[in-house]
Amino acid sequence: MLKLPKWFFKWSEDNPTDLIGPGILAGVVGGAAAITAIIVAFDNPYKTVDYQTGPRGIGMDVSKFVKDNPQYDPYEETYEAFARPEAQEGEPTAAEAYGETVIAFGDLPQSSFDRLQEAMSAWVGAPVVLYDNGEVDETTLAITQSCVEATQYLNTDWDTHNLASDGKGVNCYTCHRGQPTPPGSWLKAGVVNSAASGWAGIQNRLLTYERAGTTAFVHKYTQSEFTSLPVDAVEKFLLDGENIKVHDLESRVAQQPGDPTWQDAERTFSLMNHQSNALDVGCVFCHNTRAFYDATQVTPAWSITTLAQQMTIDINQNIYEPRSEILGRESAKVNCMTCHMEVISPLNGRDMVAEWPELASPVQ
């Protein structure tokens, strides 16, 4: 044991000083200054942002780390805007310049029409031609015309969903994101397990399909991620229009025909999983967790989502599924991920028809 010399104790008695208190104070002040300097210089790396989803005062909100930039759509950075040129005096319209083969926007001045073709080509990552120039086949023209009609239809008959979710309409880029086939589109599950049929054939299997010569894993853009939930929920609910329902609170002993079954519940859970992934939100974005089953205790987002589900069924049934006959093969369809791509407001709420309001013109 270390023994201190007598003079040390004598000196301490003659010069009493409280070193502990000032030392603690200096340490606290110095530490606080250092932390403040770090936060000022580098910002708080663990800052959070809260998204309120339900009524005030009941804790229905979603918290996310700002560093993860959870609701920022990076695709907006690669969006290319195309301003229309000024029409010249005496300039012909597209219909006058290219004749009756113009499939859309024939009343635009020729220069604006050509510029819109250029814009659409950039938005879909492939050449887009809006008239028969002798280089495109009838099928390609028909698909292009169908896409234009779908865009106008979404911006007119379904503008309530866009406005309700702070959107500014859609154009080709909203879905295509610079790729010929929208990365968030999907195909029917089909027979995903050849060794089984019925319910066993749609569970416990990672859904893949061939697209552009490569095998694509589509669990993220359909619904079930890596769960054992059924892989056909989007097909059943957002194409076939089946009722979204779960088993009720009563015993299943006295089940009647038409009552929701566990299979219905699992498909519903699968759809909810898809919608959660598509918007990067949790259950409380739409539901009050104290009563999932009670539609009177939901958040405003629940109504917007229900409207979106009806919109998706409509365009899948009336636009994309019939397109299969034109293609001679199954046509890719849409779901929540197709537009949202893991954010609440696609493309950060950008006005997607500001430059070209013709994309929101009433469908004739």
Image: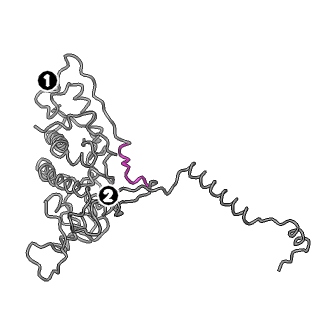
Q: What residue type is labelled 1?
A: Glu
Question: What label sits on residue 307 in the rendered view?
Answer: none
Number of callouts: 2
| Residue 168 position by quadrant | top left
Task: Identify the magenta region.
Answer: 68-76
Residue at (12%, 31%) from the top-left corner?
Answer: 101
Q: How crowded is mark 2: few (under 14 residues within 10 Å), some or many (20 or more)?
A: many
Q: Residue furthest bottom?
A: 253
**Looking at the image, residue 101 lies above or below residue 296:** above
Residue at (27%, 37%) from the top-left corner?
Answer: 121
Judged by depth in the image, the label closer to the viewer, 1 or 2, is 2
Residue at (20%, 25%) from the top-left corner?
Answer: 109
Q: Name the residue under label 2.
A: 53
The one of 322 and 248 positioned closer to us in this rendering: 248
Q: Which amino acid does label 2 sit on?
A: Thr
Q: Which residue lies furthest to the top in this view?
A: 89
Q: Name the residue under label 1.
A: 96
Q: Does the magenta stretch include residue 158?
A: no
Q: Is residue 71 magenta?
A: yes
User: Percent position (x, y) of residue 323?
Assistant: 13, 49
Residue 269 lies left or right of residue 260; in this view the side is right
Question: Mark 1 or 2 closer to N-term?
Answer: 2
Render colour scheme: one colour
Residue 276 lies left or right of residue 296; in this view the side is right
Which SS class for mark 2? loop
Q: Which quadrant, please, contains the C terminus?
A: top left
Q: Residues within 10 Å of mark 1 (few under 14, many from 20)?
A: some
